[in-house]
Amino acid sequence: MSSSLQSVSPPLCHLLKWVLKVTLQMKLETVDFKDKLEETKGQINNSIKDLTDGHFENILADNSVNDQTKILVVNAAYFVGKWMKKFSESETKECPFRVNKTDTKPVQMMNMEATFCMGNIDSINCKIIELPFQNKHLSMFILLPKDVEDESTGLEKIEKQLNSESLSQWTNPSTMANAKVKLSIPKFKVEKMIDPKACLENLGLKHIFSEDTSDFSGMSETKGVALSNVVHKVCLEITEDGGDSIEVPGARILQHKDELNADHPFIYIIRHNKTRNIIFFGKFCSP
């Protein structure tokens, strides 16, 4: 869910409103930061709360906006995946999670035995598995080192080689095959407020934050309008919930059984399968 909010002083282009609403399905509102700052903050927070079914409250911190704010972009992403085949809640057990070679922490571990698409990446001594969600449009890929080999999380070797090309190669269907898998993965929730301003500037978008260099002429007739702030909050929740499918369909079924026990740090990727776009990307290092 994305929302763009602009101060009441620069008038908005009517064509822009239509494009955002109809084409991009974004919500654009004109608000008054200058004279009604607290009221506007409350309006934005309530709007985000409603749109995320109450999961995100008070998304705007005190320093997110002020009476000089011109354009504010707010993005909130809350994802609760439903698996193609649900995990049995009765099989979820507390187990030790190895955060490094010597230390462990308790975690709720979900367990299942079913058919999944799985592969081995010998160059980084790692297993990869695809866990499809219920609508089949999205999948979670887990990259799990076979053991904690370095002095930190055990992910150093994977992280050094991980890029768009290597990920495309590792997730290529020709390098994976369907097999009966005894699967154990943690039940977890990750929530984070991200400041993407530095990332956008590193990508070359420095000019949009400066009134001297920004050009929003297609958005407003007022000169000297710049993007004041970008607020981005994400939450990913992985639970047992899912459908009743017994098997994950595939052309090649290996008869032997394999095992993936994610009881130590791993990288997770949620991908839109048709476009191969990455929706979420992260690493689980500690409960």
Image (cartoon, rainbow, N blue to C red):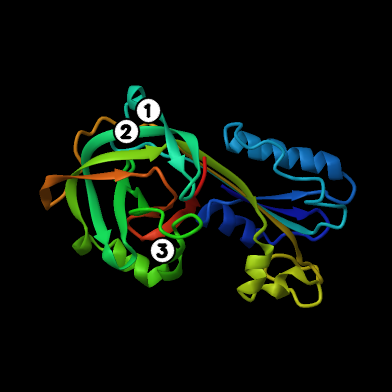
Kind of residue at disc 2: Asn
Q: Position of residue 160 (x, y in %)?
A: 45, 69
Q: State the residue at coordinates (40%, 58%).
A: 149
Kind of residue at disc 3: Ile
In this view, 147 is above or below 93 = below
Residue extending furthest toward the left: 255
- Name the element at disc 3: helix
Q: Position of residue 134 (x, y in %)?
A: 32, 39
Say whether marks 1 and 2 touch (CB < 8 Å): yes
Horizontal side of 176 relative to 161 (left or right) equals left
Kind of residue at disc 1: Thr
277 vs 23, nearest the viewer: 277
In this view, 27 is above or below 54 = below
Q: Residues within 10 Å of mark 3 (few under 14, many from 20)?
A: some
191 vs 216, nearest the viewer: 191
Badge number at residue 30? none
Which of the 4 image quadrants contains residue 94? top left
Give me the C-alpha separation between circle 1 and circle 3: 28 Å
Kindly identify which residue carries mark 1: 92
Horizontal side of 135 relative to 189 (left or right) equals left
Q: Is residue 127 visible?
A: yes
Q: Position of residue 266 (x, y in %)?
A: 42, 51
Q: Residues within 10 Å of mark 2 (few under 14, many from 20)?
A: many
- Name the element at disc 2: strand
Give me the C-alpha separation between circle 1 and circle 2: 6 Å
Badge number at residue 158? 3
Horizontal side of 147 relative to 286 (left or right) equals left
Q: State the residue at coordinates (48%, 50%).
A: 100
Disc on the earlier residue, 3 or 2:
2
Q: Position of residue 42 (x, y in %)?
A: 77, 38
Kindly identify which residue carries mark 2: 111
Give me the C-alpha separation between circle 3 and circle 2: 25 Å
